[in-house]
Image (spheres, grey):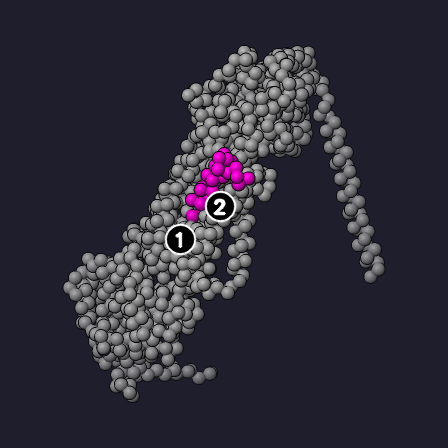
Amino acid sequence: MNVRRGWGIFGILLALLFGACALSLLAGPYWVPISEMPGSEIVRMRIARILLGIIAGAGLSVSGVIFQALLRNPLAEPYVLGVSSGAGLGAAVAIVMGLSGSGVWGVPVLAFAGALGTILIVYALARTSSGAVPVPTLLLSGVIVGAVLSSILMFIVSTSEAEKLHNVMWWLLGSLQALDWWPLEIAAPPVAAGLLMAVLLSRDLNLMTLGEEPAAHLGLNVEQTKKLFFLVASLMTGATVAACGLIGFVGLIVPHIVRLIIGPDHRRLVPASALAGATFLVLADSFARSVLPVEIPIGVVTAFLGGPFFLFILRRRTSPYWR
Amino acid sequence: MLSLKNVSAGYGRKLVVRDVTMHVPEGEFTGLIGPNGSGKTTLLRVISGVLPPAEGEVLLRGAPLRAIGKRRLAQIMACLSQELALDLAFTVREIVLMGRSPHLSRIGRETRRDSEAAEKAMALADVADIADRFMTEISGGERQRAFIAMCLAQEPQILLLDEPTSHLDVGHQLSLLDLVKRLNRRSGMTVVAVFHDLNLASEYCDRLLLLHQGRAEALGSPQEVLTAEIIQRVYQAKVLTEPNLVSGRPHIVISAGAVPPDN
Amino acid sequence: MIRAHDERERCWSAAILSVGVLAVLSLVLSARVAQAEGEPARKPPQRIVSLAPSVTEMLFGLGLGDRIVGATDYCDYPPEAKKIPRVGGLGRPNLERLLSMAPDMVIATDLERKDLPDALRRAGIEVLLLKIGNFAELFDAERKMGEAVGEPERAARQVREMQAQLDAAAKLYAGVPRDRLPRVFIEVWSDPLITAGGASFLDDVVARAGGVNVAHDLERDYPTINPERVVEWNPDVILLCYMTEAKDAAAQVAGRIGWSGIKAVRERRVIADISPDSLLRPGPRLVAGVERLAERLHPPQAGKAVPPAPGNPPEK
């Protein structure tokens, strides 16, 4: 099967996703026999987690693909422009102010606000007088803003009482626990819209990888495209972070793995990354809930599973996509 | 076809190109030459539309460049810049097909017409036999030709080249420039190219623009521009000019400077 | 060459020996200091710094409120305690401020820095460390404190009163066999879902109120759990113990995915209106919390239908 060109690979990815979902339905501290599944409340809870995992996994992966294409840097990922610090700060402020807990919107709203606010600040700082946003300046601006926000976050962490501290740290590690439907409700629309946009405009992403000037020579309005894609990717990231906390590694690793297998053409890379990211996160969540008696934070699992897998793929080096 | 009127341009507040006026008739092969830092690449970027001039304006067939939409411009003008990424894991064919972007709608797919245009471009650029190889696996010369094919797939009327032969050995240099010259002569494609090597510029160009510290120092045929006196003034180098043994065009003859005796 | 070896070996032995002697010496010294902890003060302390709200409450209960010169940011009960100068957060006092208050005794429960008591003792301040993990320890702490501050009879009286209240609460479920006691899920926090395990004070509170903590077998004091476990445990009562802004927290709980089948939700026994202070603040007020909880778990009118707890969705 020609992985580059054929559509067979998508069939495989879909099958893998189904498999991951099936596994996730079975995973957990309690065994639910298949005959009992239809009415089972526990299964309902697991379905909610699976859906959230699909949305978050797809959103983070595609967001990573977009950042890697625009910034032309293999280390780029959804949190590279300081978004994680901003969102974390927003969430920490909400938790410390007591605006958290069942049915209270403080944490997701402030986390989302933190994420978006950070992007806007970073963007504004990097803008030149002519309205262009040069990539190296953007990266630098993101790192600096991220560092400053991080330090404020650490300050809050250091002065808060033990119980709030625990909540903040837990949030920072990410979780797909879905007791209500609202995380899905706030994450699904931006992620779906972002995915659609990325798929439709994949060619633009291809052109961007040639370089900004060559892309302009081929008729692309580079600055407008950059702005649009940054906004889209940031919204997807912000929504995911608001719903699930900070889940790291997915946005960095999944695009690379998929690119090594399927190639850099974004018309295939984007949908494949979405599927692969969803599968990866659903699998990671199954793992997080069932391996130990305590629930492992999902950010830990994604790093733990993702890292070695990426290394494995990298070492094979038979891929022509390995430069 | 292409007119520059009192164009000045630069980066930030620093002007690199000052008050350049020139006219490129249709079908002509024009070369931009000059010492390092004289503004050749900057001028080319102004012509290609990516760098707006600080003063003056650029006209394409009488219409101001900035009024022409980016996509429309890319359908007329192709530019091979130095900034092209080298580590692209696309195949040659995929890269060449990207050259069809200006002719496709934003979310449209490629049609047979586009595939044919790409095949034609690859044949012209002599990369048809490596069409399915990866850009990372081919040689530097082949890569340049692949990028030329990408430009040709745009079906442009004007081709801009920024030092297209740097990093190429003499064989590849000549084959690339022969290709461009052929296109220029047979299909009337206007070419503006930045040259580093004066002899290559002399051989292939109909006219030369010599830049010195951002200003147009000389504009004319190779015979008019490449004189020993002008070269001495601009490059501070003492050379001889002789007619090329084969083509008769001016040929710069260099010799190593006198070595002072050991005392 | 052989000589050099001997020299080096001798050096090493000397070094190891001195290190060993130093280690033993310090062990002995610290043991002696530790012994000093339990000894009663020679005369009652006049300037006491309290490093825990429970301690502050107990001191006020012993009538010594005016002897407290420093308290934590969270010491807010009784209301007079709010006027006491602040010395820092829970378990994390500002050392300089503490010393500037010139106390002669410091009473603490949990301290982040384990070397703090020794540092204070070196400064000539008596330190009383109390462990308050359940009611038995609470009463013990009350007695120890009474001894240390010179009010042993009042302390004993306090303990008797508290015990009496606990006994009164126990009467409410006196005849109920153990396997008919309501099974309670204690929700300490919702996101992540945290409950109180067997090692927590809350576990003891619920037990004294005549309930059975479904998470009793979990050893840690506040473990984070998978919500699926609550569905499996199927508790009779859900007790929310957090200070939250949400006005209808109980309804929120009832609406959670997969929880609609839980007995507590179906019978509308989600308790969200017992003040968290009386459940979470280790100290004398917990006894009030036990009483309130017992009344809710075992309502006096036996045989009548249990009314929905406040905040639960009304009968359809």
Check the image and name the residue furthest to the front.
A35
Q: Which residue type does callout 2 highlight?
A: Cys
Q: Quadrant of residue B167?
A: bottom left
Q: Answer above or below: position of A51 versus B45.
A: above
In the displayed structure image, the side of residue B13 where residue A117 appears, left or right: right
Q: Quadrant of residue C169?
A: top right
Q: Answer above or below: position of B27 versus A143.
A: below
The answer to whether residue A146 shows anywhere in this view is no
Q: Which residues fall within the magenta stretch?
A: A33-58
Label 2 CA crowd tier, 10 Å (few <14, some 14–19, many 20+): many
Nearest the eye: C71 or C294:
C294
Residue C115 in the image, given as x and y percentages of width and height? 65, 33
Q: Answer above or below: position of C82 versus B6.
A: above
Residue A293 in the image, given as x and y percentages of width and height? 60, 39
Q: Which residue type does callout 1 highlight?
A: Pro
Q: In the rendered image, which residue does mark 1 sit on? A: A271
Residue A79 in the image, given as x and y percentages of width and height? 44, 47
Q: Quadrant of the N terminus of chain B?
A: bottom left
Nearest the eye: B53 or A169:
A169
Disc 2 sits on a residue from what chain?
A
Check the image and name the residue furthest to the left.
B62
| Foreground tag (2 vs 1) | 2
Label 1 CA crowd tier, 10 Å (few <14, some 14–19, many 20+): many
Residue C69 in the image, given as x and y percentages of width and height? 58, 20
Q: Earlier in the sequence, mark 2 or mark 1?
A: 2
Which residue is found at the position 72% from the left and 29% from the top? C34
Q: In the rendered image, which residue does mark 2 sit on? A: A21
